[in-house]
Image (cartoon, helix red, strand yellow):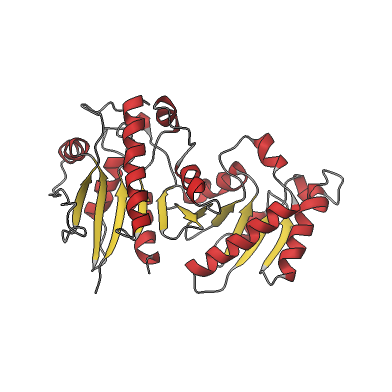
Amino acid sequence: MIPKKIGITLGDPGGVGGEITLKALSSQKFVSGTNYILFGSRLLLDEEIKAFGLNLEIPTLNKNEKFSRSFISLYEVETPIKNIKRGIPSKENGHASFRFFEEAVKQARKGTITSIVTAPISKHSWQLAGIKFAGHTEYLSLIYPQAIMSFWSDRLNIALFTHHIPLKKAIKRIRKDALLDFFLHLNSSIEKLCTGKHSFLVSGLNPHAGEEGLLGREELDEIIPAIEEAKKKGLPISGPFPPDTVCRNAFNHPDKIVIALYHDQGLIAFKLLSFDTGVNVTLGLPFIRTSPDHGTAFDIAGKGIANPQSMAEAIKFAVKSCK
């Protein structure tokens, strides 16, 4: 049997990425026939292992081979880092975390790894390093324009129509044609990912989903026409539902996926319910990409108290979803 090869990027060296990755790999029950390849630097990896007293021996990958037979190995990525700056954004850390991710994507596109799990990066560090992307999904969207940001847990599933853009811009993008295109691509991605039944619950934009136009016309003019057209094409979709109740309709229903129209509309509810167990999944790619649903946690970096559960769930999701 050909082993699954899961690439894991170590994230911003100043945050908790290395800590939660190594804790997750140390604690979880691993799936037989899976190799884990860490994309990072030996300096960072050795510091993390020593700092947190972990009993892990991780060899450096021989890049001339078709990936390691070792259970866990390091894919050494060259960076300018000579010492680790913890707890703050920095140019060096931004450059390093981007290089870790960029190399993992390169290997996934070549087929040498079957999925990518990304530890958290700092958008501020990327900005300091001159990297123009707002995050992982934005970089992937440049290569795969149909990439979709979604969040999964055993309590609630969310797909975002827009994500890391200002609210004013997000509202301007709520147009029938753009919504319909999103619904179709999302459905196609879900069908590839899941074998069971699923349905979509679309959130409205305005209070009470517009109250028949009394509180805004976006529902009448753009959202409802897009939903009706999607239904004609066979999609299991309904709405728009009032934004303050739509997540209640999907709570504890793993077959239901809420379509939120902008970032906080979906993620306030999701992170309230599933902060420690949620998984960020980028749909619409030829490979699986997951990550924990939280950030770099600079305030607790290096203290050894970061909770690895979301990272462990992201790894498990990637392994389970690999074909």
Q: Is residue 7 left or right of residue 277?
A: left
Residue drawn 41% across and 25% down?
A: 128
- Viewer-side residue, 261 vs 65: 65
Residue drawn 63% across and 55% down?
A: 259
Judge whether residue 203 can be spotted in this image: no
From the top left corner, tell me how far across and down residue 190 is, in percent: 53, 65
Q: How many numbered marks, from 0 up?
A: 0
From the top left corner, tell me how far across and down residue 226 is, in percent: 75, 58
Q: Is residue 67 left or right of residue 150?
A: left
Q: Is residue 196 left or right of residue 70?
A: right
Q: Work out whether 111 lies above or below 260.
A: below
- Viewer-side residue, 11 vs 211: 11
Q: Work out whether 212 lies above or below 83.
A: below
Q: Is residue 274 left or right of residue 230?
A: left
Residue drawn 25% across and 49% down?
A: 38
From the top left corner, tell me how far across and down residue 200 is, in percent: 63, 63
- Residue 40 placement: quadrant: top left
Q: Work out whether 60 lies above or below 71.
A: above
Residue drawn 24% across and 74% down?
A: 1
- Viewer-side residue, 284 vs 249: 284
The quadrant of the image that shows the C terminus is bottom left
Judge whether residue 242 can be spotted in this image: yes
From the top left corner, tell me how far across and down residue 202 is, in percent: 68, 57
